[in-house]
Amino acid sequence: MDLKMMRTCTKVTVVLLLLHCHTFGAEKQALQFIRLPTVVPNPNPAAPLAAVLSYEANQDVTAEVSLTDGTNRWSVYFDEAKKIASGLPVIGFRPGRNHELTVTIKNSAGQTLSVNGLVFHAPNIPTDPTLFPRIETRTSLIDRVEPGYRLLNPRRRVPQGAQLNEEQQRRFGESFGMLLMVDRHGTPVWYYQCESRIAGFDYLDNGRILFVTADFRLVEIDLLGNETRSWYAAERPQGYAEDSEDVPALTFHHDADLLPSGNLIALTTKRRRINDYFTSETDVDAPRQTQWVMGDRAIEFTPDGRVLWEWDAFENLPVRRIGYETFSNYWKRRGVPDTIDWSHANSITKLDDGSVMVNFRYQSAIVNFDPADGKINWIFGEPSGWPEELQSKLILLEGDARWPWHQHAPVFTSQGTLLLFDNGNYRARPFDQPTPVAETRSRAVEYKLDLEKMTARQVWTSETADDRPLVSVAMGSALELPETGNILAGYGAVFDPSRINEITWNNRRGFNQITRCVEYTRETPSEVVWELELKPTGSAPEIGWNIFNTQVVRLSAR
């Protein structure tokens, strides 16, 4: 080794030795607060039940915040650096109560330091009946209820009997968005409000929430209600959205997911002019005409809005296979005039094998395809009306179990079964006679698929839990819970059971709706262990409340 190289190696060794000594010295340094913890009300009015924790330590630390309101005790954990410039979100506060907080920090050597005696008074929830629903819960088997908070998205409905024109009705519903967390007693512990109705949402592993809005945006927020990222459909009727990434799409609707890669998958749409198309779902002989038809488009895109692949329902499914409600005003109410609703997808999921599963409500079918080439792998749904080229893709249902109709939220469980929420609407396709509303039942239901034999059998249903005539005409979800194995079902828009015999598929819009979240055991017969109901609020006329879906969130709540 020459002299120059020896000098270089000596310098490197000295530098490394100094770095090691500095690090060793930091580990030996006593853990201290440079700035003591403080907790203040969230400055963002969009999430008023949250508080902001701030502190500064002399080392990199993790933090645990222990809280109590005198009755409930819970903890929130943070894996953060020593300086918390913008503050940390703390949630779980019960409205109108004083809470005591203890903050404990911990360094990599295991040293801890605590500060207690912090006090936070949580504000009350709004008393305005247009801003907050009335919540009732019933628990029958508390020791069998899944731990954690329930996250749902209350959506307000036009008051029954209100004298509002069509535009006023649309604005009343679509100009209000809400996410709400409640504990197992139904007490609100966090909520967020915005100016556009919220559809599908997902609580993410990083503690943020991704959701879809009625004005065709995807929004990610933190628990302080701050928008961290957002995307908008560049071709949407509302036009440009400030401080948001544009994605080449006509709409975003119903559902979107953040993938482990950081990309997103979402449901969007295409509008196509089709000649000689149906004008009725009840009269097969009704005159045909040229129609603007809306079909679904599934996409994956990068965080900067670049589309990686797309799958077009028009190119892969039979456009003349229609379902009941094709001629509803769904898209007209959302700013796309003179357009009928053909496929009406409402959920999208990328599976572990790379395939994508999309649920088509008006087709009463779940379609799985390969995004690499667009080819359909299988179709699960009532088998009538499919063309010959798709017959080999149909999964057939064994036994006398009934098919799901107008379903929502299919998902594969930890046991490999397919779980979904079966709204049960119509139980028929045009132009067959639908099942009366009074004979309809909505349910959570689970199937075991055999993709080699292309068969399925029903293995569980919530119907055995009770015989109440629960008919959720729209929306809904079903979710397997990780600790108990229970199923949490969200009955999105439920007809009043006491008036079910008065309701028909033609007059249903004249009746108010409620919403229910029900937790069932996975047994046969199943049992109801927990139930939440959002009641109409205010004096006459009463405001109705629905939800799109619900989840359980674990924040070390007890």
Image (spheres, rainbow, N blue to C red):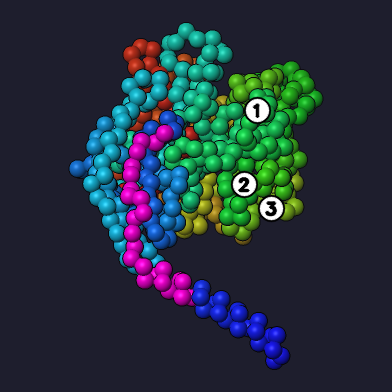
Disc number for residue 370: 3
Q: Dot 2: what SS?
A: strand
According to the picture, the residue beneath numbered tag 2 turns out to be 264
Q: Looking at this view, is 486 or 453 the one in front? A: 486
Q: Which residue occupies 40% across, 20% down?
A: 130
Tag 3 or tag 2, which sits nearer the N-term? 2
Q: Which residue occupies 52% across, 34% down?
A: 199
- Chain part drawn in magenta: 20-43
Residue 283 seen in the figure: yes
Query: Does the magenta segment cover residue 420?
Result: no
Query: Does the magenta segment cover residue 42?
Result: yes
According to the picture, the residue beneath numbered tag 1 turns out to be 341
Disc number for residue 210: none
Residue 371 point in image, percent of width and height = 70, 51
Question: Disc 2 vs disc 3: which is toward the camera?
Answer: 2
In the rendered image of this protein, does residue 384 appear above or below residue 159?
below
Q: Residues within 10 Å of mark 1 (few under 14, many from 20)?
A: many
Tag 1 or tag 2, which sits nearer the N-term? 2
Q: Which residue occupies 38% across, 56% down?
A: 57
Quadrant housing residue 62: bottom left
